[in-house]
Image (spheres, rainbow, N blue to C red):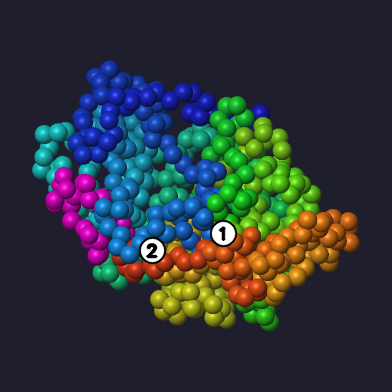
Amino acid sequence: MKKIVSIFSIAFVVLLSACNDEFMDRFPETSIGTENFFKSEEDLKMFLYNLYSFPGINEYGDDGYQTTDNAANTGSTELKNIMLSSNPSSATVTGGWTWGTLRNINLFLANCEQADVSDDVLAHYQGVARFFRAQFYMEKVKRFSDVPWYGQVLGTSDEELLFKGRDSRETVVENIFEDLEFAAEHVKADQPTGAVNKWVVLTYMARYALYEGTFRKYHAELDLESSANTYLEIARDKAKLIMDNGGFAIHTTGNPENDYSTLFSSQDLTSNAEVIFANVNEDQVKNSGWWEWMFGDYETSPSKDLLQAYLMADGSYYSSQSGYETKLFVEEFENRDPRLKQTYAYPGWKLINTGTYAQGGGIYVQKLQKNFTGYHQIKGFINNTEQSITNGVDFPSLRYAEILLTYAEARAELGTITQSDIDITVNVLRDRAGMPHLSLNPTIDPLQEVKFPNVTSSMKSTIYEIRRERRIEFALEGYRYDDLMRWGAGKLLEKEPVGPYFPGLGKYDLTGDGINDIVLLDDSESIPAVKEENDLGVKLIYYRVGPQDSDANVYISGDNMGYIQSIKDRGTFVDPKYYYRPIPQTHVTVNPNLTQILGWK
């Protein structure tokens, strides 16, 4: 049985249940019976456990739900709705302006000194609380940019503070990094599994510094480019500190066909050298919440654009292959980076955990369906029918791979990266995947140059390839949205995600055995009652294909030929406005000092 720490198996103490969050978003209170609490280390632990919220299984869908070029999504998402709207405003975009968590953190910091603990123990818990405050505020900065900074508990009589306007992004981010620096200095490294430790703090510090440094560099509307390097240097230094002292390593057993995928299907990541923080689950103790949705038959499905980003097995660009745009499904997976077949369902993949999939188990024939790309995700999919297994799968919330790529990207953006830097970062990941090494200043991939025209550095070809490595290594783990936002690449979201290419109607092999599996018919035809069998004696699967809004089973981009289409239109990304969100109108009405920025009304 895996080791489960008490913080995940005990019932959380609901200290704050009496508070009305909706009211408190406007008027934070100051008291929850503090005279009877904050007396011991156990009190401090119990309070802070209520603040824990780390990525879990649902992250496997975020590339779709957040709207990125990695995946399609049939559901309603905030950014997709904004891009399709004729006039999005603070009356229609109303999320994110919640402050209850901050109130709880500041309440803790105001009262924790009452506890009968040593100075170093107190500083540790203060550091954990300040880490959570930095985490809280960084998410606010990502969404709104300038926000009010509150470093203390507010009462209803603090009208001047309650009704103040936004503080500048510079001020808020400086305060965030002061909190992180304190936490990095005082949070202890040796903590129980599942608890915040020094390495967790440093990982987030490096992540946030890379985000802020690149955001400032690629967003001229902020007029903060001159301070970008300050944060890129923090990202570089904190990542290197972890590399030199954290004791972490990339997980590998020398099997490039499976080592990557085991990170996303493991029953126990607590001893995995690559995992800095695991969201630990165990059947009937803390269930993972896993179900089959990420396989691609619910709302999200991977895109061709992501598939085409994977290199060929010899390290060459996929786009350098003759006729790459119109390769058939089976051809797309031939001689590629092994991580592709550990992320996408590939020709010849065997489905065991059928769930609700009517086609049943065995060698999987790609299921086509309107509004889906036709590609299916197996990264994070537990191909096992035992519920105790799916309940107990761990999620690698923080991986050492991120640290390596943070260090590489920061050095590249600073213009100081060397071949040695690449060898200890990107090429370590490529070794795990059995891929050729990246060299400094490689030949530019024209597709990358088109995607990121705002990269003007003399090292732009290296930057492009580090971005590619990050996209591949963290595909469908929920990183892509933040990356596109910080790189100023929102226009890429206008491209509708598509699926496999079909040159016309007729029969096709999707399993790679040379035997036909499906038949595409014109949408004017009917699927025959008696279906033809292939050479294996298996009945062919028929699909009626046609344009968007027709009654076809599957949408296709051309006249009975082209790419499988997921959605008709993603709308327009307005730059720079849509990199930010408005403060909801109801809150501006209460506090007129909260003005909108960058074109929002």
Circle 1: element type:
loop
Q: Which comes before the other along the chain, label 2 or label 1?
A: 2
In the rendered image, residue 357, in percent from the top left (x then y), is placed at 69, 46
Is the residue 250 above or below the residue 270 in the image? below
Q: Which amino acid, by three-letter code, is at mark 1? A: Asn
Is the residue 37 above or below the residue 417 in the image? above
Q: Nearer the viewer, residue 65 or 45?
A: 65
> Would you say the residues marked 2 and 1 are in contact, meaning their CB atoms lie under 8 Å apart?
no
Q: Is residue 293 visible?
A: yes
In the rendered image, residue 368, in percent from the top left (x then y), is placed at 66, 59
Q: Quadrant of residue 366?
A: bottom right
In the visual, does 54 lie left or right of 431? left
- Segment tinted magenta in the rendering: 580-601
In the rendered image, residue 471, in percent from the top left (x then y), is placed at 54, 62
In the visual, does 70 lie left or right of 153? right
Question: Residue visible at 42% across and 45% down?
Answer: 201
Q: Which amino acid, by three-letter code, is at mark 2? A: Met
Q: Quadrant of residue 257?
A: bottom right
Other residues around mark 1 within 10 Å, as few (<14) / some (14–19) / many (≥20) = many
Q: Nearer the viewer, residue 10 or 533?
A: 533
Q: CA distance from mark 2 to mark 1?
A: 18 Å
Question: Residue visible at 77% across and 59% down?
Answer: 528
Which residue position holds label 1?
Answer: 371
